[in-house]
Image (cartoon, rainbow, N blue to C red):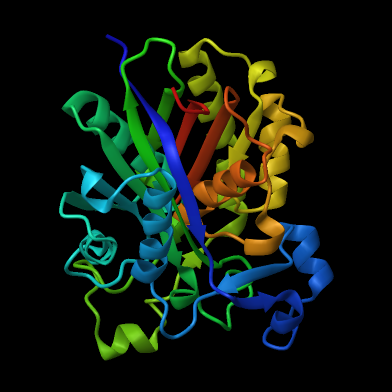
């Protein structure tokens, strides 16, 4: 029997607050023209004081469950991808599950900006292999809380958002759903994108706070170089695993980190611009939320339709990478 996990519902949640390039011009030594040329970003969403990673995840998750036509108690597992947890203990999924009203198992998954695809693969695998009926997968971030507002190399890039997908189960051999995937990590590159302070290696002290060890740090040029290669290799491996060519892909949904990375990767994969979903100009890099946010927008506005082949590919701290090929639609 060929059991598949398909996307039964989706939703997103973005803060109302906006941080534009003009706002950043008043804060750091940069210009709107420079940011747009180098990144493609024009504005990003920023959480208000009363919004958190969990509150955004609850909003997106609850709406996705409702959109799928389900009650919260129908969810058998909750998988939350985030790099900005609610607090160190307990896991953020506990807060989210309580807020949505589910009582199933839950866990957080930390794989940086590749986190949502990791969570999608983990949730789908547990659904198909464990006899579950419905799995809720969420990517949620409040990156504005971990970015140094005075660091022009990072403060121009990141925003806050959440998006969720409900996975359903089908035993039809020709059913839509997750067709193939590829996951990887090169741990030799951990220092390229990191927050050094706050863990067991460097516990929080007044000295670590004063030294700025709790802000996100990134070696941008090297991340760029590795990211393009990772997306291309992972995306190609996923297509090969499914027996699909790039010409057959209807939509490429990459992690929204940098428009130049997206353009370079899609070009090398052989996917044209008109079949690539891009929303980075309005949201910036929302890490684990970026791929499901782009998916949800493209599905809501009718670009992604039932039967479409959708290739998702992300990369992030670790350095991790992850790709997944979906046949969109309900059985």
Horizontal side, residue 230 vs residue 74: left or right: right
Q: Residue furthest right?
A: 33
Q: Which x, y percent locates residue 313?
A: 53, 37
Q: Quadrant of the C terminus?
A: top left
Foreground of the two, 187 or 281? 281
Q: Is residue 320 visible?
A: no
Q: Quadrant of residue 171?
A: top left
Q: Which x, y percent locates residue 244?
A: 57, 13
Placement of 249 over or under 112, stated as above or below = above
Horizontal side, residue 162 vs residue 311: left or right: left
Foreground of the two, 165 or 249? 165
Q: Which x, y percent locates residue 205?
A: 24, 85
Placement of 75 over or under 173, stated as above or below = below
Horizontal side, residue 20 vs residue 328: left or right: right
Total number of numbered discs in the rendering: 0
Q: Quadrant of residue 170?
A: top left
- What residue lies at 27% left-to-right and 9% top-to-bottom? 1
- What residue lies at 46% left-to-right and 15% top-to-bottom? 241
Q: Is residue 312 visible?
A: yes
- What residue lies at 84% left-to-right and 68% top-to-bottom? 33
Q: Which x, y percent locates residue 87?
A: 25, 73
Placement of 52 over or under 119, stated as above or below = below
- What residue lies at 21% left-to-right and 76% top-to-bottom? 203
């Amino acid at each position: 029997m060929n059991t598949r996990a398909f996307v039964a519902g989706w939703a997103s949640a973005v803060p109302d607050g906006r941080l534009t390039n003009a706002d950043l011009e008043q804060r750091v030594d940069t210009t709107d023209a420079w940011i747009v040329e180098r990144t493609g970003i024009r504005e990003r969403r920023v959480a208000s004081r009363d919004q958190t990673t969990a509150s955004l995840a609850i909003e997106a998750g609850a709406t996705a469950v409702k959109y799928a036509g389900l009650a919260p108690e129908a969810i058998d597992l909750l998988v939350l991808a985030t790099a900005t947890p609610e607090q160190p203990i307990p896991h953020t999924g506990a807060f989210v599950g309580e807020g949505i009203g589910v009582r199933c198992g839950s866990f957080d998954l930390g794989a940086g900006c590749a986190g949502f695809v990791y969570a999608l693969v983990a949730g789908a695998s547990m659904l198909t292999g464990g006899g579950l009926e419905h799995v809720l997968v969420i990517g949620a971030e409040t990156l504005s809380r971990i970015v140094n507002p005075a660091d022009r190399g990072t403060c121009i890039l990141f925003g806050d958002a959440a998006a969720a997908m409900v996975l359903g189960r089908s035993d039809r051999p020709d059913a839509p759903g997750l067709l193939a995937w590829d996951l990887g990590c090169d741990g030799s590159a951990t220092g390229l994108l990191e927050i050094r302070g706050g863990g067991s290696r460097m516990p929080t002290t007044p000295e670590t706070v004063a030294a700025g060890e709790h802000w996100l740090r990134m070696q941008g040029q090297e991340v760029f170089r590795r990211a393009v290669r990772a997306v291309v290799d992972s995306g190609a491996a996923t297509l090969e695993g499914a027996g699909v060519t790039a010409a057959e892909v209807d939509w490429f949904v990459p992690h929204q980190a940098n428009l130049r990375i997206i353009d370079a990767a899609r070009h090398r994969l052989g996917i044209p611009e008109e079949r690539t979903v891009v929303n980075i100009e309005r949201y910036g890099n929302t890490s684990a939320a970026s791929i499901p946010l782009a998916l949800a927008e493209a599905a809501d506005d009718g670009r992604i339709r039932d039967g479409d082949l959708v290739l998702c590919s992300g990369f992030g701290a670790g350095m991790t990478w992850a790709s997944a090929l979906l046949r969109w639609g309900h059985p």
